[in-house]
Image (cartoon, rainbow, N blue to C red):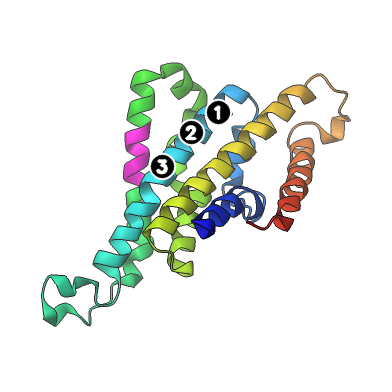
Amino acid sequence: MENLLSLFVKAIFVENAVFAFFLGMCSFLAVSKKIKTAFGLGLAVIFVMLLTTPLNYVILNYMLGEGALAWIHPSLADVDLTFLSFILFISTIAGAVQLVEMAIEKFAPALYSALGIFLPLITVNCSILGASLFMQEREYNFSETFVFSLGTGIGFFLAIVLLAAIRERLQYSKVPPALQGLGIAMIVTGLMALAFLSFSGIKL
């Protein structure tokens, strides 16, 4: 339990996908101009990540890994299909994003219009694929995979909503012309990354 809590907190703050690994920076910068759209995209990323990373764990361990197909027939015990993991991970993410896109279009058409092209682009959001690849590389079990995906999703949500809130406030500030737009957004992102890094001293 202690290990899972530590993993959860680390995934949100210390190993934040945006601030520690620079994953998902495209949508992070592009959709963080308003809190409402950032909030919607953040929730969509949490949902997709929570759905796809555990699903990819099941696919990896019960279909692709060496010996994973032994339950079908003993002659398949030596089969290793892990070279297909990258393609299948992206396929499950694309399928989940389609579900989210259809749900948001039906129940929140205003948010659907506001997110625009960035909603289907969740498919290629590096933070979502990165969570599945970290799961594979670090050999997490199912519980750790679920907690890690939830923490990573919340970390992305927290990062994009906080940046959106700051950028809305910056509209009323006198930012030098040369730094307006992405310039000041990158500076704020760097400062937020330093702030999140300060949580690395916490031991749970």
| Cβ atoms at labels 1 and 2 below 8 Å apart | yes
Residue 9 at what x, y percent from top left?
59, 50
Residue 147 at what x, y percent from top left?
46, 51
Residue 7 visible in rendering: yes
| Relative vertical location of residue 23 with respect to residue 68 in this rendering, above or below | above
Secondary element at image label 3: helix
What whole-number distance in Å separates the C-alpha atoms at marks 1 and 3?
14 Å
What whole-number distance in Å separates the C-alpha atoms at marks 2 and 3?
9 Å
What whole-number distance in Å separates the C-alpha atoms at marks 1 and 2?
6 Å
Q: Residues within 10 Å of mark 1 (few under 14, many from 20)?
A: many
Rendered-image quadrant of the C terminus: bottom right
Whether the magenta-drawn stretch holds residue 77 is answered as no
Which residue is pictured at 16% across the width and 78% down the height? 76
Whether the magenta-drawn stretch holds residue 97 is answered as yes
Residue 90 at what x, y percent from top left?
38, 54
Residue carrying label 2:
43
Which amino acid is tagged 1? Phe
Which amino acid is tagged 3? Val
Which residue is pictured at 40% across the width and 52% down the height? 53
Which amino acid is tagged 2? Leu
Residue carrying label 1:
39
Residue 93 visible in rendering: no
Residue 203 at what x, y percent from top left?
67, 58
Residue carrying label 3:
48
Q: Main secondary structure of the magenta part?
A: helix
Task: Tell me which segment is drawn in magenta.
Answer: 94-100
| Cβ atoms at labels 1 and 3 below 8 Å apart | no
